[in-house]
Image (spheres, grey):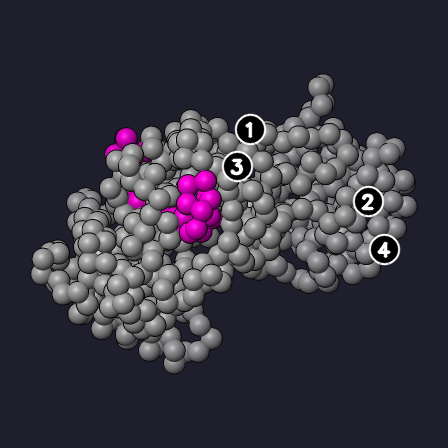
């Protein structure tokens, strides 16, 4: 059996220390030759003790082989990172909001344990969970469904349970996205720099509350720093490059690892380029730069920063010490254990028990299964023809699958008409919706919001909003099922029966069951919606 020995700071050369501050990346590119070259260069870095951490993409085409080679090559406890906000495996949860809507520390713990156990089995030692961002107003950048809510004490309790589960599974936990500011605009930092006017005092009172409390509990192994600029703390640089903003938490006693969010986002490189930002990130107080490019380019960029004085010896040594401390922590976990069937079944209930119903007083969330309803199902742009029929047979890459949804609705409500309506409805879609619904008892609407990076603001199209308003002049919409960011619902006229769920097939399936009276709505709303 191969012996794994921990590295010592005093034994490392400057070239080795520079590499220790990198979280390199093994990831998919279209070019197989480039993939092979990147992997071989990475293995050479590991052999030479010049890489502190590696991020191995779950979708890498030769994942098992790459992970085997990394483990086989490393004779020190290199940190192996992944992101698993929705879990790992086929039964992912509907993002962190699903945990928040259960309100259950038991569900939060089992999410952490199942995710951590699966990650460890695959070869990971660090998982970037939990998300500590709290949402108390509409936001973009697909963050809403990645939040466990707006109550700082509740989010802290759930986050603590997640981390305990991860630790029991044998992986380190990295909270994100520090400092978890709300932002004063709708900018996605993948596209440009974000902005928040919060002060240090305001941060400590709200956004950083979970961070500080988790650190006091000794639970938080690390943080991932985001790319928002906070001019009331540092007028010049975004968080991931700002010693002043990172220092707010360091002064609270945090001595764990700090890793940047991916540096090639335009929130960074549009201003600072692809090279200098690497050294600037470590100089600012991060310990690992998430380089997110080919590792040869990243290492040469980091070495250049060191040689030109952008990254000083003092900050380099401090970062390497923390990386080595984190590597040491990964050696302290016990033996790997398999999950029980009971644990897996509990995990799967996160999606079903996070469904929330909001109804007018005296109204149940259910409708008559044998009634005659006109059911309009919002579908992705271009997936329905002008007659409201699905033109794409399957939606294999997403959690929202209109073909399966329509089939379930038709089987559950046999006397109803199910109509596929484009999320940016055409003239014919709106004509069918407002004209042909009058032959039915009422209208049921299903909508979704699938937040993604580079998508920007999350909102319904004006055409969709207008169609719903037209129906509500005569109170035709008796129920709306919505999956994803719920804040766009604020644009709609009053609907007496709302059923809200997360980003997962099981959430959608269960939401339909709630509407039919076949499953109770057990979840709670975790955001302050201002519904009409």
Look at the image and tell me whether residue 63 can be seen. no
Q: Residue at x 33, y 58 (%)?
A: 280
Residue 525's spot in the image, x, y percent? 57, 30
First in sequence: mark 1 or mark 3? 3
Q: Residue at x 81, y 56 (%)?
A: 426
Question: 274 or 103: which is nearer to us?
Answer: 274
Looking at the image, residue 400 lies above or below residue 97: below
Residue 210 location in percent, x, y? Answer: 38, 33
Q: Residue at x 41, y 67 (%)?
A: 274
- Between the residue at mark 1 and the residue at mark 3, the CA separation in whole angstroms equals 15 Å
| CB contact under 8 Å: marks 4 and 3 | no
Q: How many marks?
A: 4
Mark 3 or mark 2, whichever is nearer to me? 3
Which element carries disc 1, helix, strand or loop? Answer: loop
Q: Which residues are magenta?
A: 214-240
Which mark identifies residue 427? Answer: 4
SS at circle 2: helix
Q: Earlier in the sequence, mark 4 or mark 1?
A: 4
- Which one is closest to the eye, mark 2 or mark 1? 2
Q: Is residue 284 above or below residue 182?
A: below
The answer to whether 7 appears left or right of 497 in the picture is left
- Residue picked out by circle 1: 524
Q: Which residue is mark 2?
A: 467
Mark 4 to mark 1 CA distance (whole Å): 37 Å
| Helix, strand or loop for disc 4 | helix
Q: What's the distance in space between the residues labelled 2 and 1, CA to CA? A: 28 Å
The span from disc 4 to disc 3 (Cα, nearest Å) is 35 Å
Which of the marked residues, 3 or 2, is nearer the chain's N terminus?
A: 3
- Please state which of residues 188 and 482 is positioned toward the viewer in this rendering: 188
Q: Is residue 394 visible?
A: yes
């Amino acid at each position: 059996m191969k012996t794994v020995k921990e590295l010592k700071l005093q034994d490392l050369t400057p070239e080795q220390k520079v590499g220790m501050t990198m979280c390199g990346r093994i990831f998919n590119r279209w070019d197989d030759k480039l993939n092979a070259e990147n992997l071989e260069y990475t293995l050479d870095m590991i052999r030479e003790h010049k890489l502190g951490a590696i991020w191995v993409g779950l979708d890498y085409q030769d994942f098992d082989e790459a992970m085997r080679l990394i483990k086989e090559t490393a004779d020190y406890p290199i940190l192996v990172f992944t992101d698993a906000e929705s879990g790992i495996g086929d039964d992912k949860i509907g993002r962190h909001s699903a945990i928040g809507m259960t309100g259950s520390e038991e569900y939060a713990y089992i999410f952490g344990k199942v995710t951590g156990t699966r990650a460890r089995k695959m070869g990971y030692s660090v998982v970037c969970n939990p998300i500590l961002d709290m949402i108390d107003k509409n936001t973009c950048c697909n963050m809403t469904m990645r939040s466990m809510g707006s109550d700082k004490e509740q989010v802290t309790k759930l986050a603590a349970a997640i981390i305990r589960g991860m630790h029991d599974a044998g992986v380190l936990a990295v909270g994100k996205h520090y400092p978890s500011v709300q932002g004063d605009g709708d900018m996605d930092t993948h596209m440009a720099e974000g902005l928040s006017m919060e002060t240090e005092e305001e941060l400590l009172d709200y956004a950083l509350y979970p961070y500080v409390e988790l650190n006091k509990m000794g639970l938080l192994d690390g943080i991932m720093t985001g790319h928002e600029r906070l001019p009331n703390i540092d007028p010049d640089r975004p968080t991931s490059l700002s010693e002043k903003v990172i220092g707010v938490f360091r002064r609270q006693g945090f001595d764990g690892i700090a890793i940047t969010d991916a540096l090639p986002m335009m929130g960074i490189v549009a201003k600072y380029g692809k090279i200098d930002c690497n050294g600037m990130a470590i100089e600012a107080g991060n310990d690992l730069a998430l380089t997110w490019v080919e590792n040869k380019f990243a290492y040469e960029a980091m070495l250049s920063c060191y040689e030109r004085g952008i990254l000083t010896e003092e900050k380099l040594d401090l970062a390497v010490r923390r990386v080595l401390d984190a590597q040491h922590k990964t050696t302290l976990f016990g033996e790997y254990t398999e999950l029980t069937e009971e644990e897996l079944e509990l995990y799967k209930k996160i999606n079903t028990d996070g469904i929330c119903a909001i109804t007018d007083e005296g109204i149940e969330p259910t409708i008559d299964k044998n009634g005659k309803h006109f059911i309009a199902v919002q579908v992705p742009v271009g997936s329905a023809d002008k007659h409201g029929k699905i033109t794409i047979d399957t939606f294999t890459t997403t959690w929202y699958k209109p073909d399966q949804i329509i089939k379930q609705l038709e089987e559950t409500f046999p006397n109803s008409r199910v109509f596929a309506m484009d999320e940016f409805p055409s003239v014919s879609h709106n004509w069918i919706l407002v004209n042909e619904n009058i032959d039915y008892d009422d209208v049921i609407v299903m909508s979704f919001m699938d937040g993604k990076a580079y998508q920007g603001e999350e909102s319904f199209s004006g055409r969709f909003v207008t169609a719903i308003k037209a129906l509500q002049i005569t109170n035709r919409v008796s129920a709306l099922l919505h999956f994803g960011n719920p804040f766009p619902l604020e644009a709609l006229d009053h609907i007496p029966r709302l059923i809200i769920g997360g980003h997962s097939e099981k959430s959608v399936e269960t939401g339909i069951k709630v509407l039919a009276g076949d499953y109770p709505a057990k979840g709670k709303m975790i955001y302050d919606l201002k519904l009409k």
